[in-house]
Image (cartoon, grey):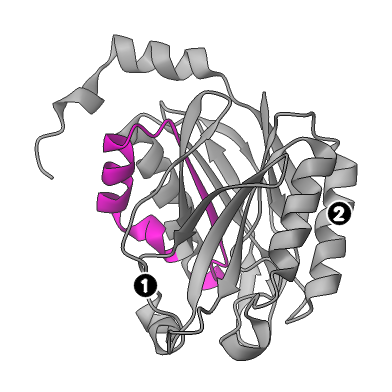
Amino acid sequence: MRAHLLQLDLVWEDHEANYRLVEVALDNASPDPGDLIVLPELFDTGFSFRTEQNADTEDRTLRFLLGLADDLGVTIQGSRTIRPCDCDKAFNAATVVAPDERLLCEYRKIHPFTFGREPEFFQGGSHVLTYTWNDLTVCPAICYDLRFPELFRKGLKLGAHIFALGANWPSPRQHHWRALAIARAIENQAFVLAVNRTGDDPHLSYTGGTIAVDPKGDILGELTDQPGTLSVEIDPKALHDWRAVFPAWKDLRLN
């Protein structure tokens, strides 16, 4: 079974244009039924703070994801802006869908990016969540979450075998992105699937660097700074064998 990480040059605040980018990328990737698709953070608009304009209030993005999942027979994780009517601020949410119009999970980004003013427009979530993909447990995360290993430890305690993360991670700290993705895989003995965007928005530039890491910290695949899709084979046996041979994950002591 495969995971497909779609590294896109997102079109600023243009839902329809970004839907088309996803469709073209998936046409080129040719996923098989049962595969996993991971999209960048806020894939439908880019990292915009105009939450009233960009919020998925009519579930247009949700319907797009549900339709794709149903048509292709795949599981899809993609982040969107949601703004409940009783909240002053929006949530940056990783929505996970599966065929038959199933909403598997909706994780709300726990760590808004204070340095980038995100908390002024988005409030943080409070729960680490997981979902099931082909008998493996996946823990979703979003961008800045990558810097907080305690989230990943909580995911591990919930049974995570894979951490899937979508991001708009800017170029100046690109070396942190790669190092942290590898570290999260090694310390949790889990697959890490980390997809970044590329290109520019009105405020920042992005270098891509989408990466897939196995439970030993070995690189399964990596992209450069150009749009593309990273497709990797996920081998559950490799994970279970490594955790059995070197069971460091069982020695967790601190909560």
- Residue 218 position (above or below residue 210): above
Q: Position of residue 118 (x, y in %)?
A: 44, 82
Q: What amino acid is labelled 1 in the image?
A: Gly
Name of the residue lying farthest toward the left: 253
In the rendered view, tell whether residue 50 sits above or below residue 25: below
Q: Is residue 99 magenta?
A: no
Q: Is residue 216 left or right of residue 244?
A: right
Closest to the observer, 105 or 167: 105
Q: Residue at x 25, y 18 (%)?
A: 247
Q: Is residue 224 visible?
A: yes
Q: Is residue 226 left or right of residue 251?
A: right
Q: Would you name the residue on which mark 2 appears?
A: 23
Identify which residue is drawn at 42% across, 30% down. 161
Question: Mark 2 and mark 1: span between their CA atoms?
Answer: 30 Å
- The magenta stretch spans which residues? 144-172
In-image side of 149 versus 119 (left or right) = left
**Residue at 25% across, 51% down:** 150
Residue 208 in the image, given as x and y percentages of width and height: 64, 59
Q: Is residue 57 left or right of residue 228?
A: left
**First in residue order: circle 2 vs circle 1:** 2
Asked if residue 50 shows in the view, the reply is no
Residue 159 counted in the magenta span? yes
Which quadrant holds the C terminus? top left
**Mark 1 Cα-neighbour bin, 10 Å: few <14, some 14–19, many ≥20:** some
**Residue 105 locus on image (x, y percent):** 51, 50
- Indicate the secondary structure of the residue bearing disc 1: loop
Q: Residue at x 60, y 89 (%)?
A: 52
Q: Which image quarter holds the N terminus?
A: top right
> To which residue does mark 1 refer?
124
Identify residue type, mark 2. Glu
